[in-house]
Image: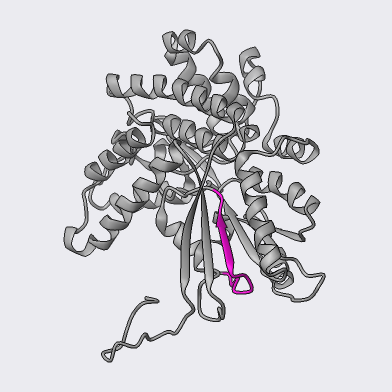
Amino acid sequence: MKDTSCRDGQRLATMPPKVVKTCFVELSAEERKCYDEMERQSQIIIKSFVVEGTLRHNYQIALSFISQLRQICNHPALCSKSSSRLLASNIEEYVSKKMELIRKYRSVIKDEDDFDCPICLCQPEKIVRTHCNHVFCESCILKIVKEERFLFPIYTPCPICRRPLSRSRVYDVPQPTVKEDDLKKLINSNVEDDLQTLINSKPNLSAKIKKLLQLFMASKEANPSIKSVVFSQFRKMLILLEKPLKAAGFRVLHLDASMSIKKKTEVIQEFGKNGSNSSTILLATLKAACAGINLTAASRVYLIDPWLTPSIEEQAISRVHRLGQNEEVRVIRLIVKNSIEDMVLQLQEQKKILAGGATLVGRKNSKSQANMRLNEICTMMSL
């Protein structure tokens, strides 16, 4: 560990200090109205799951609602068209026909750009679906099935709903086919079309982007050569950030998981160069930069959105604060007040405490872990 010391009290590795600061952001009146409406509608559906005892079965639907709320905190434009249409003003009508809503939402889930696998909490590279309609990374779910078949020769419990699961009940998710009229209205563009629309559009700056620009301008005044890394879970948010940063005179590079290893290496090498024409800001997704790369050329880290798993955040920060770093590292978290991001921070602190006492507590059984995940959903949704 970085803070491991010898018997004489000296640390094994001498590193510059790391300072973590939380910067709170107030949403504009328009953003707050959009967020509150989405939160209200999401709570209606998730609360109905809790009352009926079906939250575990509809776990991924709840996660998708949470993802939408987190994205609105960054910029309302990030809220996907499909989810916006599902959460329309006639939500009461949808709730009365909840089974139809669930069917449509499950059709939409696989087309969400920022959907997370419930096991690894990362964006799935290859999506598979179980017979109980839960979606996972293929590598994650097959690893569980393979490992537990020795204990359960016939079936392995689904990690979400605990229904019997075997390899024959895990299916590849086919490419979306549009046949029904209602599905055409829900899914009328793929992920790349949405990204291109964001690139070509000129959306208003959100409160969080404005705050970030203020922080960058202040940092530039103090030292124009300071290099910074901006982390976000959402690729679309980084695309929205690029234009205003370039318009403000910053040289920007982009790093995400869709790049090849060769391209990532070129970007990192370019970011490490010094000079008047060198890039000073690197926009990176947490998934692309949470491990295996060296970003010690930077001394500032900006976390646009809090990650549900604190260890992944810490890995991303450690790309900058690691051996080879010669300057003090400052980490700035941007958190929207009175939002789901407040709840995520609370959960992060609880997980850090649990992780610190892991050796004393021991390994929890799968049922206990599943109940913890459901409790986290209720906490984040203020239920």
Quick check: 239 left or right of 28?
Answer: right
Which residue is depicted at the point 26% across and 55% down?
354
Q: Position of residue 165 (x, y in %)?
A: 33, 38
Which residue is depicted at the point 55% across and 13% down?
89
In the foreground, 270 or 107: 270
Dominant SS in magenta: loop
Which residue is depicted at the point 62% across and 47% down?
211
Magenta segment includes 295: yes
In the foreground, 312 or 112: 312
Please state, as top left, top right, bottom left or bottom right, where the C terminus lies in the image. top left
Q: Which residues are magenta?
A: 293-304
Residue that lies at the very extreme toward the bottom in this rendered image: 8
Q: Position of residue 282 (x, y in %)?
A: 67, 61
Position of 154 relative to 359 (above/below): above
**Can the viewer see residue 135?**
no
Magenta segment includes 72: no
Position of 322 relative to 40 (above/below): below
Please state, as top left, top right, bottom left or bottom right, where the N terminus lies in the image. bottom left
